[in-house]
Amino acid sequence: QVQLVESGGGLVQAGGSLRLSCAVSGNIWSINSFAWHREAPGKQRELVAWRNKADTTKYADSVKDRFTITRDNDRNMVYLQMNNLKPEDTAKYYCAADNYPVCKSNWRGYDYWGQGTQVTVSS
């Protein structure tokens, strides 16, 4: 089993920045990729950013050039740096981990999830 715990969410004005953190524990050796998803009220959960062990990354078009997913192997942490935030970025953000090294298009396919952290961007 793998446990994921997110932190770093909060309220920020449009144009501001936040860094979300995801602490990873358990059978870390089995994990080949990490991702951040988000879910806004009334909308389906969507992939925001993804990174595998080979450091291949993928981003949603809506966050490209604004968000960056990184990992710190020494600290067993995964981060999502979010810059130039917009009101439409408001959502609950979830850290996910998967045994598969290829980005999955369906969020339901990820093996492990955190409890989520709320991000609210005011205009």
Image (spheres, rainbow, N blue to C red):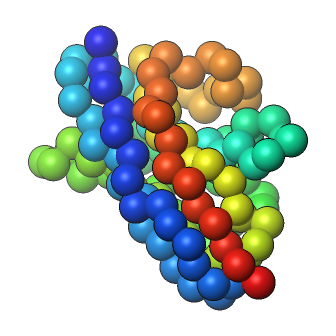
Tell me which corner region of the image, top left, top right, bottom left or bottom right, holds residue 44: top right
Marker count (numbered)? 0
Q: Quadrant of the C terminus?
A: bottom right
Tell me which corner region of the image, top left, top right, bottom left or bottom right, holds residue 45: top right
Q: Residue furthest top?
A: 1
State the residue at coordinates (50%, 41%).
116
State the residue at coordinates (39%, 46%).
6
Name the one closer to the observer, 6 or 75: 6
In the image, residue 70 lies at what x, y percent? 39, 56
33 vs 92, left or right, is: left
Q: Residue furthest left?
A: 74
In the image, residue 2 lies at what x, y percent? 31, 20
27 vs 67, left or right, is: left
State the residue at coordinates (21%, 42%).
76
10 vs 42, left or right, is: left
Q: Is residue 9 above or below residue 85?
A: above
Q: Is residue 63 above or below residue 48?
A: below
Q: Quadrant of the N terminus?
A: top left
Res 38 visible: yes
State the residue at coordinates (78%, 58%).
61
In the image, residue 15 lies at what x, y percent? 65, 87
In the image, residue 110 lies at what x, y percent? 56, 21
88 vs 77, left or right, is: right
Name the one closer to the observer, 72 or 84: 84
Name the one closer to the observer, 122 or 94: 122
Q: Residue furthest right?
A: 42
Tell me which corner region of the image, top left, top right, bottom left or bottom right, holds residue 89: bottom right
Res 65 visible: no
